[in-house]
Image (cartoon, rainbow, N blue to C red):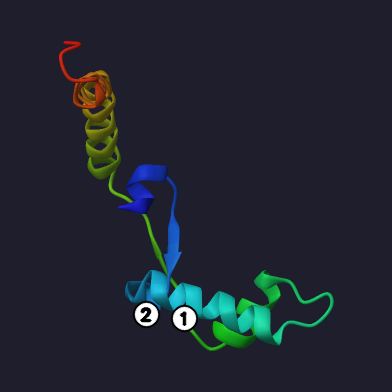
Amino acid sequence: MLAAALDTPVAVTDTASEGGAWGMALLAAYRAERSDGLTLSRYLSENIFDDDSFETLVADPSEVAGFAAYMSSYRTGLPIERQAAELLTAPPGSI
């Protein structure tokens, strides 16, 4: 989905499905273990992903077009969402 949304190849590992909690744990470990000059990028490449294999995913053109159509439809609905929020937050009797 990300490759289609950005219309660019995306590299993932076997652990890509682990999601946000795993990512937050990695950031916490980096913060606890980092030394001067150790960048997050270097920490990840040397300590976390040093033996992982990456797969590069490329979105099919139909997926890119589908995501663009979805976003167009989503943007079309934003004024409706704004108006609904205004109506729901309006003081009683003001409508």
Which part of the image, by quadrant, shows the C terminus? Answer: top left
- Tag of residue 75: none
Q: Which amino acid does label 1 sit on?
A: Ser
Which quadrant of the view contains residue 58? bottom left
Which quadrant of the view contains residue 37? bottom right
Q: What residue type is labelled 2?
A: Asp
> Which structural element holds mark 1?
loop
Residue 48: percent from left, percent from top: 56, 84
For the point 37% across and 51% down, the residue is: 3
Mark 1 crowdedness (10 Å alpha carbons): few <14, some 14-19, many ≥20: few
Decide which of 58, 75 is in the foreground and name it. 75
Give the labeled residue for mark 2: 14
| Front label number (1 vs 2) | 2
State how many labels appear.
2
Decide which of 35, 51 is in the foreground and name it. 35
Vertical comparison of 64 with 1: above or below: above
Callouts 1 and 2 close, C-beta under 8 Å: yes
Which quadrant of the view contains residue 15? bottom left
Vertical comparison of 85 with 34: above or below: above
Residue 29: percent from left, percent from top: 59, 84
Mark 2 crowdedness (10 Å alpha carbons): few <14, some 14-19, many ≥20: few
Give the labeled residue for mark 1: 53
- How much space separates mark 1 and mark 2, taking CA atoms? 8 Å
